[in-house]
Amino acid sequence: MATATYPPPPPFYRLYKDYNENPKSIPERPPPIEGTYMCFSGNYTTDDVLPSLEEQGVRQLYPKEPNVDFKKELGSLNRELQLHILELADVLVERPSQYARRVEDISIIFKNLHHLLNSLHPHQARATLIHVLELQIQRRKQAVDDIKRRREEVQETSHGVSRNPSWAVEHGF
């Protein structure tokens, strides 16, 4: 019994069969999805809003003020995490049956750390964009300076040739 190495292409490839003769013959793009949609049995939304820890049913361990000092709070949560891990090790040695509460506390600390780091993504994206744009500006300024330098070299060469035609022969022009 012979079988194909690769599966056949999806049936929508036929929509593009006349593309080489008429590039405008392709179907219209579907409109972008807005609101909620389902993917892999999960509901998702197109809104880029980070849900609060309270909405996720997690106790928030850092202040609820809008201007959070991320560096300070991440540091304190990190120290608290280290302390809880040491306590978990102690509990596992002395009272192994009571580890569940410590594990839950560590889970809450990790969720708070994760939420704080996710809150930094817009700032990181902005800083990355600023850095990329500054690099582009720097490269373009270097290109302009290079063009100006080469133009001056050409002007010097042309002035040298116009003043003294034997100069061109001496310099291989």
Image: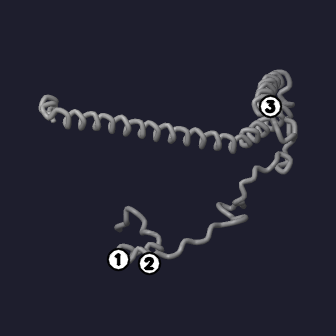
The answer to whether any part of residue 44 appears in the image is: no
Q: Amino acid at mark 3?
A: Glu
In the image, residue 47 above or below residue 123: below
- Number of labelled discs? 3
Q: Secondary structure at mark 3?
A: helix
From mark 1 to mark 3, how far is it between C-alphas? 61 Å
Q: Secondary structure at mark 2?
A: helix
Q: Amino acid at mark 1?
A: Glu
Q: Secondary structure at mark 1?
A: loop
**For the point 16% across and 36% down, which residue is it?**
173
The location of residue 110, given as percent across then percent down, is: 76, 36
Residue 66 lies left or right of residue 23; in this view the side is right
- Asked which quadrant contains residue 108, the reply is top right
User: What number is the disc on residue 21?
Assistant: 1
Q: List the residue tagged with mark 3.
A: 73
Residue 121 lies left or right of residue 147; in this view the side is right
Q: List the residue tagged with mark 2.
A: 25
Question: Does the CB distance between marks 1 and 2 fall below 8 Å?
Answer: yes
In the image, residue 119 above or below residue 10: above
1 or 3: tag closer to the N-terminus: 1
